[in-house]
Image: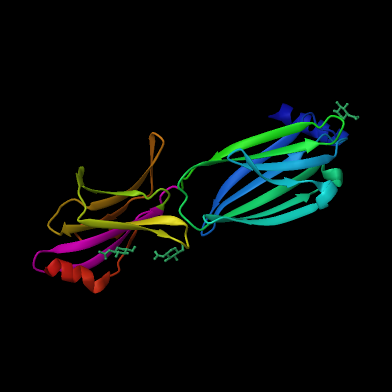
Amino acid sequence: MEWKLTVLCVCACLGTITAMQVTVTSEWKPDIGWELSCSWQLFSNDSLQSVRMYYNEQQFLIYRPEEDGDKRSGIYRRPEDMMTINCEETSDRGVTGTCELTMELYQPQKNSFTFACEASGERPTFRIERKAIVIEAFVPPTDAVVEVGSVNAESGRVMLNCTSSGVPAPNLVWTVGEQKVPRDFSGSFWNATSKLWHVWSVLSYTHSNEHPAVCTPETSKGSKVVQGEPAEYNSAGDVKDIKSILFAVLTSLLLLS
Ligand SMILES: *[C@@H]1O[C@H](CO)[C@@H](O)[C@H](O)[C@H]1NC(C)=O
Ligand SMILES: *[C@@H]1O[C@H](CO)[C@@H](O)[C@H](O)[C@H]1NC(C)=O
Ligand SMILES: *[C@@H]1O[C@H](CO)[C@@H](O)[C@H](O)[C@H]1NC(C)=O
């Protein structure tokens, strides 16, 4: 660490770098989609010839300061998303700079994709550096929320509606004690505002039960299972991470039927 810091300092002080660098990042932005960025740093005696960006190995943008000036922005629309791009030199001759991309989703993201960025220095050497990242169609499940329906006094039954959101649509797993229990009914839809799959699952729970009902959101990522924070309801009617909202006349109708 210390050694690295020293090297960084020495390089900064001399105003040179020991390698050309390109960095790409991705971040999920709630209610928008993906925010991608590419930043570069050339040798300090070089100048920027071009920055190229690729979606699944297909070039969709080239920024060339010689033609575009020290900034370039653009908007690319597709049926599934809208990409807003801003590229900017942040030092003389484009030795450093950044392109920022916002990918607003209009449809659920189905597949992962590759985002690559390539910066090139000027003639005669045209030094090139390239980085690529894979953006998976994955957003971890949000914490479970359980809404409590009206209680049927006679049977001591209550309808619990558990919800969570994520990409792909999370599974909602109900357990009572150690036992997994099947839901009574469930549904899901893509929320065009949050850009996430919203899922819900209803369990009818009897108050005579000694164990609490726990709802855990789960999403598979490759061979791993990613869980959201569970929510719990117990027979005393105590709630943990539960919104005590009487959800709809529908529930009472269902209980009566
Ligand atoms: C620019 O700097 C690099 C690294 O310090 C060096 O290898 C290269 O020869 C220099 N190029 C010119 C044209 O001075
Ligand atoms: C459970 O909640 C979701 C909203 O989060 C709602 O769309 C669904 O209709 C509810 N289910 C029942 C049975 O009320
Ligand atoms: C969709 O998501 C937005 C924001 O994330 C939220 O405010 C809204 O209640 C959600 N709509 C439904 C129908 O769940």
Q: Is residue 187 above or below residue 61?
A: below
Image quadrant in which the N terminus is located = top right
Asked if residue 36 shows in the view, the reply is yes
Is 187 colored magenta in this rendering? no
**First to last magenta residue range:** 140-165
Whereabouts is ligand 3, in terms of quadrant?
bottom left
- Most foreground residue, 226 or 231: 226
Residue 169 lies, in percent from the top left, at 37, 50
Residue 158 lies, in percent from the top left, at 18, 63
Quarter occupied by residue 72: bottom right
Quarter occupied by residue 119: top right
- Most foreground residue, 2 or 30: 30
Q: Residue at x 77, y 33 (%)?
A: 8
Q: Is residue 202 above or below residue 137?
A: below
Residue 127 lies, in percent from the top left, at 79, 31
Quarter occupied by residue 56: top right
How is the protein colored in the picture? rainbow
Image quadrant in which the C terminus is located = bottom left
Horizontal side of residue 108 vs 120, given as left or right: left
Is 158 colored magenta in this rendering? yes
Asked if residue 237 shows in the view, the reply is no
- Most foreground residue, 100 or 111: 111
Q: Residue furthest left?
A: 154
Residue 85 lies, in percent from the top left, at 67, 53
Q: Residue at x 77, y 36 (%)?
A: 120
Q: Is residue 83 above or below residue 52?
A: below
Q: Residue furthest top?
A: 3
Horizontal side of residue 95 vs 75, given as left or right: right
Horizontal side of residue 7 vs 234, given as left or right: right
**Magenta stretch prevailing secondary structure:** strand
